[in-house]
Image: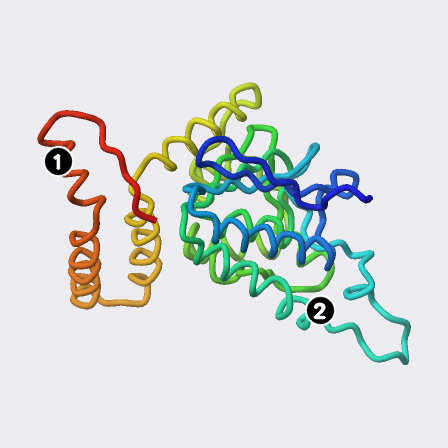
């Protein structure tokens, strides 16, 4: 039996999904997309999972799309042209939207290079923790394409138009430390501390009020399309929903009793 293209491991309430094509820097193929979709669906359905970590095997996080995959390989002159947009529609669009809608917080643990769609997928997670040796590359311009997997939406929102255009047009490698300084990612960590940092953060998020964390993602994402009045209304609607839930009652009771809270909503 061939080795899994996406490895699944649980540690308490934290589930880690590891892209597993290390010889190809975990570049995506259709088969790996299908395994990742199945793994994400299983995590969604597992009530004991309260935080998800996405990472890569070996020395890379994800090099994006495998250009040797027949679905994207350029065809000879005279043949029907390759339609990369169809691959985006079939695989990357559902993946990005699914990560954005996961019922638990999602951490991208970027252990090495994140290039092309691999960078976009990492940046689309709720938090990005990168090893200091890691890097981010908007590689699309080098093969005559535009950023995809949500890159055109994410980049200007994270780092502004000027930086987004420069990163996308040049395709230059951005070291993790510079990515943190630019606001592209949340944290850059020394390689020796990277694994412990990810474990600690994931365990911390798993112990927090999951439903409220996911609602926080939703309301912050939606606010970028709202004026202040509508954002205030949205906040009030979410507070009405969340204050009727167990975790609000438990959080307040724990605060007043000066004890640790035990959250269970999902």
Residue at 62 percent across and 46 percent down: it is 137
Q: Nearer the viewer, residue 256 or 176?
A: 256
Q: Nearer the viewer, residue 249 or 138?
A: 249
Vertical comparison of 217 with 111: above or below: below
**Residue 1, position in %: x, y?**
82, 44
At mark 2, the secondary structure is: helix
Vertical comparison of 190 with 173: above or below: above
**Residue 103, position in %: x, y?**
40, 52
The residue pinned by badge 1 equals: 253
**Residue 245, position in %: x, y?**
21, 51
Residue at 46 percent across and 31 percent down: it is 12
Q: Residues within 10 Å of mark 1 (few under 14, many from 20)?
A: some
**Residue 138, position in %: x, y?**
61, 51
Report the side of 60 relative to 109 (left or right). Answer: right
At mark 1, the secondary structure is: helix
Residue at 52 percent across and 21 percent down: it is 193
The earlier-in-sequence mark between 1 and 2 is 2
Residue at 30 percent across and 54 percent down: it is 215
The residue pinned by badge 2 equals: 84
């Amino acid at each position: 039996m061939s080795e899994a293209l996406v490895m699944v491991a649980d540690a308490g309430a934290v589930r880690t999904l590891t892209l597993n094509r290390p010889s190809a820097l975990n570049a995506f193929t259709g088969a790996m997309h299908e395994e990742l979709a199945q793994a994400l669906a299983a995590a969604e359905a597992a009530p004991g999972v309260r935080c998800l970590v996405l990472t890569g095997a070996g020395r890379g996080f994800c090099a994006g799309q495998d250009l040797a995959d027949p679905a994207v390989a350029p065809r000879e002159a005279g043949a029907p042209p390759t339609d990369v947009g169809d691959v985006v529609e079939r695989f990357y669009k559902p993946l990005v939207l699914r990560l954005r809608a996961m019922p638990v917080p999602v951490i991208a643990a970027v252990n090495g290079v994140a290039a092309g769609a691999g960078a976009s997928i990492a940046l689309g997670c709720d938090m990005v923790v990168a090893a200091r040796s890691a890097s981010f590359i908007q590689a699309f311009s080098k093969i005559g394409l535009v950023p995809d997997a949500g890159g055109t939406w994410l980049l200007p929102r994270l780092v502004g138009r000027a930086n987004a255009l420069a990163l996308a047009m040049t395709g230059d490698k951005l070291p993790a430390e510079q990515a943190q300084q630019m606001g592209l990612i949340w944290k850059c960590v020394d390689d020796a501390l990277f694994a412990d940092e990810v474990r600690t953060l994931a365990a911390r998020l798993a112990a927090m009020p999951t439903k409220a964390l996911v609602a926080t993602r939703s309301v912050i994402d939606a606010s970028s399309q709202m004026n202040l009045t509508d954002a205030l209304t949205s906040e009030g609607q979410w507070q009405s929903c969340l204050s009727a839930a167990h975790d609000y009652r438990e959080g307040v009771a724990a605060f007043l009793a000066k004890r640790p809270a035990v959250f269970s909503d999902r």
